[in-house]
Image (spheres, grey):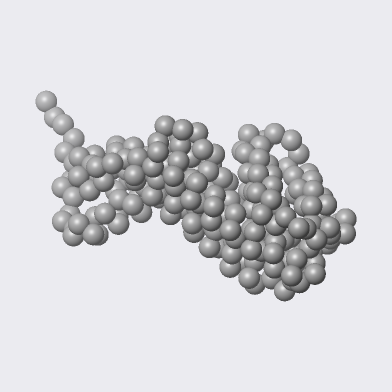
Amino acid sequence: MTRTLRRRAGRKSPEARGEQIQAAARSLALDQGLSALTLRSIAARIDVTPALVSHYQPNMDALIAATFTSIVSEEIEEVAALLAEQPTPTAGLAALLDTLLDAERDDVTIVWVEAWAMGRRSDALAGAIRGEMDAWHDVLRGFVEQGVAAGEFETDAPDAVAWQLLGMIDGLNAQALVRWGDPGERGSMLGRAVEGMLGLTRGALAAESRASAATAT
């Protein structure tokens, strides 16, 4: 009888092995979703035994929560940097909507959608989700406050606007994952709603998006 022999994993320091496992979990979550994270799938990605993964990451709930945080916090940093690059708050708002509704971010959207479902049964993941939602809210609230201070946005409730904006973006992105509705209409519908929330002229965000696209080309 023959059997397949697994090549013995090369020796690494505990720190290096831990980082390798975390990187594998992150890449697997972006490729296949957060629900794909298991001892076996992570081990297969880096060609080691599940027992070795378990040795360095004995708590899968904690690893899944940390993977979620790693992916989402990076996106928040990217978006915050994007907002800081824009010449005006209105241009920043248009760029924000364009990038968060971009299908190229579907991998992160899938991570979010699965996390909400999985978080019902994992205190570690639920806590991570709440933390990242708070971080998103802080970024958006601060941005709305800047727009008000610049005289471009009109609202006396930036905190509520930030929550509403998050909810609308999350909902539209979840719909996009199952291809419900017209993809071309999502951005314009959201833009019109946000313009109304912030006292912007109808079509202001679409105009900024077109101007940005023309500059990019």
Give the image location of residue 32, x and y in percent.
46, 41
Give the image location of residue 85, x and y in percent.
64, 72
From the viewer's perspective, is 158 left or right of 201?
left
Q: Quadrant of residue 139?
A: bottom right
- Can residue 102 be seen? no
- Can residue 15 be seen? yes
Q: Quadrant of residue 209?
A: bottom right
Give the image location of residue 86, x and y in percent.
69, 71
214 to 25, vertically: above or below: below
173 to 196, vertically: above or below: above
The one of 165 and 15 positioned closer to us in this rendering: 165
Q: Residue at x 80, y 67 (%)?
A: 152
From the viewer's perspective, is 101 left or right of 213?
left
Identity of the residue furthest to the front in this view: 156
Give the image location of residue 23, x and y in percent.
36, 54
Q: How many marks?
A: 0
Q: Residue at x 62, y 39 (%)?
A: 174
Q: Residue at x 63, y 70 (%)?
A: 84
The one of 145 and 1 positioned closer to us in this rendering: 145
Identity of the residue furthest to the top in this view: 1
Q: Residue at x 76, y 48 (%)?
A: 190
Q: Quadrant of residue 122?
A: top left
Identity of the residue furthest to the right in this view: 202
Split into 4 quadrants, where in the image is the C terminus?
A: bottom right
Split into 4 quadrants, where in the image is the N terminus?
A: top left
